[in-house]
Amino acid sequence: MWMSKKEQLAYDIGWAVGFWVGEGWLTIQKRKCKTKSDSFSLQMGVTQNEILCLKRFGEILDSIGINDYKIHTSHANRKNIQYALYLNQKGAKQFLKILKQFPLYSEKREEKVLEALKYFSESEKTSFWGDIE
């Protein structure tokens, strides 16, 4: 079955959202400062033992204009290699806006996404640290 470009894009975005919801992670760490305004670190990504799904996820991100990510390789031990795709602050913000449009089927995940978007909306008052380089 052939799909139009619009249908393919919708399918790909749905796949990427489902992949992240099932396999991804989002960490928000807030730092209280006495002398400066509070700051936070937002890290977002997916870790896998196989790289093919991560590459597909990256291709979909590229196709929707999210290029602010990196794929890293780590050796958990001598036998196993793990791959991780990390979204930096800009890429995370863009992908979070997409996630907000989908039912995530997890109250915990949905709360985390909304919390992260709240931090971004307050970015004028808040500084960022821990951005993935």
Image (cartoon, rainbow, N blue to C red):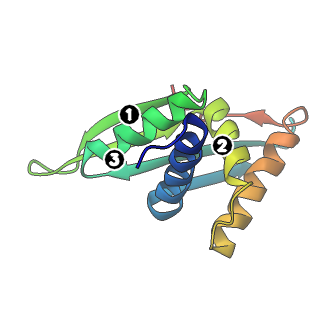
Q: Nearer the viewer, mark 3 or mark 2?
A: 3
Q: Are marks 2 and 1 in contact (CB under 8 Å)?
A: no
Cα separation, mark 3 vs mark 1, equals 12 Å
- Residue 129 in percent (x, y) is at 66, 34
Please tell me whether mark 1 sits on a helix, a strand or a loop: strand
- Assign a secondary structure to mark 3: helix
Q: Position of residue 101 (x, y in %)?
A: 74, 54
Amino acid type, residue under disc 2 in the picture: Ser
Disc sitting over residue 71 in the figure: 1
Give the percent coordinates (x, y) of residue 82: 26, 47
Task: Point out the residue furthest to the left here.
Answer: 79
Measured in 3D between alpha carbons, the distance from the residue under mark 3 to the one under mark 2, in whole angstroms, is 26 Å
Q: Can you say whether 114 is above or below 70 in the image?
A: below
Q: Nearer the viewer, residue 64 or 92?
A: 64
Identify which residue is drawn at 44% across, 49% down.
Answer: 46
Q: Is residue 24 left or right of residue 92?
A: left
Please tell me the numbered disc located at residue 41.
2
**109 left or right, relative to 62:** right
Residue topped by disc 3: 53
The residue positioned 65% from the left and 34% from the top of the image is 89
- Numbered-mark total: 3
Dot 2 falls on a residue whose secondary structure is strand
